[in-house]
Image (cartoon, rainbow, N blue to C red):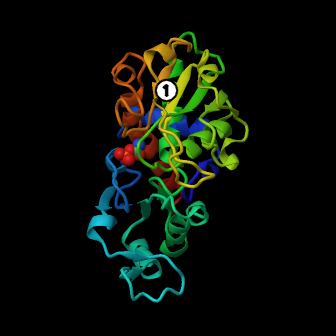
């Protein structure tokens, strides 16, 4: 694997999940794989889980991780070709990225979308410029439109949960992605990515439910059943993935904050005792209720802890491809 920015970089999802679960059982079996290799983790935006789980994963593989909080500690980067840099940006990506390519063996980057300029966000301009100019493998720690390490984690968590549940063994699970309310404009990354990965995995009955106006980009959702009726969607669900996102069509807008879309125990009662997932961070009692998050069906802590094994499986694949 030469880069990891979407599911398209993965040839076999199930094999990657298997490798991740192998690392979960034996964290240090490939400790020698990353010896004398350095991994740079660049954050243009905040993070708890991604930042720490990727560092832990790198250390399990014997690598030295170095974190660089570009947003707080770095020079302000310019990404526009031919820019006359007489404004706020100090260093062009064309100058910075090749240097990072010399310091590190693998470079991981977190960026967020502007949620102002759809064309620019969906062109993934920032991560593509790192790929173009760094000259080393690039791993997305969440980009403008996708969050592949989160989605790989989500499939690991679903498979792990199915293996532990007699009722779900050898069954095609019903997985529902439901929109939830939020007070802020939130990226579509996690929902795009979850849809892309579940569709590519192809082992589930996949349903997406959201209010009118929250349709996601069809390049990710094609293959899923889409409904505006949350009650209908939740019926007999085995897994419910809760997430807010802002509008894709009316780009970045918050069109609804309808609290009726928040998942409660009453709604959960219509499912097949579904396990509930969320990538975190979550705004309690806005996006997801206390009773669900603190209840027995919540997988959120397990899901977040599995971020280590997803990152470790991906980094090992990339290390294996380094000459
Ligand atoms: N889920 C996730 O990516 O969490 P962080 O933003 O804290 O990394």
Q: Residues within 10 Å of mark 1 (few under 14, many from 20)?
A: few
**Quadrant in the picture for residue 128:** bottom right
Is residue 72 visible in the rendered structure shown here? Answer: yes
Rendered view: 80 above or below 119: below
Pointer 1 residue = 260
Q: Residue at x 30, y 60 (%)?
A: 67
Q: Residue at x 40, y 75 (%)?
A: 77
Residue toward you, 306 or 259: 259
Rendered view: 36 above or below 256: below
Quick check: which quadrant has ligand 1?
Answer: top left
Q: Secondary structure at mark 1?
A: helix
Expressed as whole percent of the image width and height from the top left, the position of residue 184 reads 42, 47
Ligand 1 under 8 Å from disc 1 Cβ: no
Expressed as whole percent of the image width and height from the top left, the position of residue 158 reads 52, 27
Residue toward you, 220 or 323: 220
Residue toward you, 229 or 306: 229
Relative to 59, is 102 on the left or the right? right
Expressed as whole percent of the image width and height from the top left, the position of residue 237 reads 59, 19
Rendered view: 57 above or below 239: below
Rendered view: 96 above or below 54: below
* Image quarter hosting the N terminus: bottom right
Q: Residue furthest left?
A: 73
């Amino acid at each position: 694997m030469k880069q990891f920015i979407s599911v398209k970089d993965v040839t076999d999802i199930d094999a990657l999940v298997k490798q991740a679960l192998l690392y979960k059982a034996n964290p240090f079996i490939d400790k020698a794989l990353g010896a004398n290799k350095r991994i740079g983790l660049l954050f243009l935006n905040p993070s708890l889980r991604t930042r720490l789980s990727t560092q832990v994963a790198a250390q399990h593989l014997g690598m030295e991780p170095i974190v660089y909080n570009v947003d707080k500690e770095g020079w302000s980067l310019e990404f526009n070709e031919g820019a006359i840099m007489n404004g706020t940006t100090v260093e062009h990506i064309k100058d910075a990225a090749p240097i990072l390519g010399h310091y590190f063996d693998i470079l991981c980057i977190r960026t967020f979308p502007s949620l102002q300029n759809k064309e620019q966000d969906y062109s993934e301009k920032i991560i593509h410029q790192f790929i173009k100019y760094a000259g080393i493998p690039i791993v997305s720690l969440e980009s403008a439109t996708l969050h592949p390490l989160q989605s790989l984690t989500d499939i690991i968590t679903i498979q792990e949960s199915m293996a532990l549940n007699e009722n779900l063994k050898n069954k095609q699970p019903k997985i529902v992605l439901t929109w939830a309310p939020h007070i802020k404009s939130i990226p579509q990354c996690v929902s795009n990515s979850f849809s892309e990965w579940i569709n590519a995995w192809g082992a589930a009955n996949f349903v997406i439910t959201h209010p009118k106006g929250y349709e996601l980009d069809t390049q990710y959702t094609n293959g899923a059943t889409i409904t505006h009726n949350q009650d209908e969607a939740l019926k007999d669900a085995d897994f419910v993935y809760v997430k807010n996102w802002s509008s894709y069509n009316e780009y970045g807008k918050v069109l609804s904050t309808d609290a009726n879309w928040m998942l409660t125990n009453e709604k959960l009662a219509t499912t097949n005792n579904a396990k509930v997932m969320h990538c975190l961070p979550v705004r309690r009692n806005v996006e997801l209720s206390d009773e669900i998050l603190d209840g027995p069906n919540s997988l959120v802590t397990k899901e977040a802890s599995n971020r280590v094994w997803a990152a470790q499986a991906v980094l090992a694949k990339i290390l294996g491809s380094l000459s």
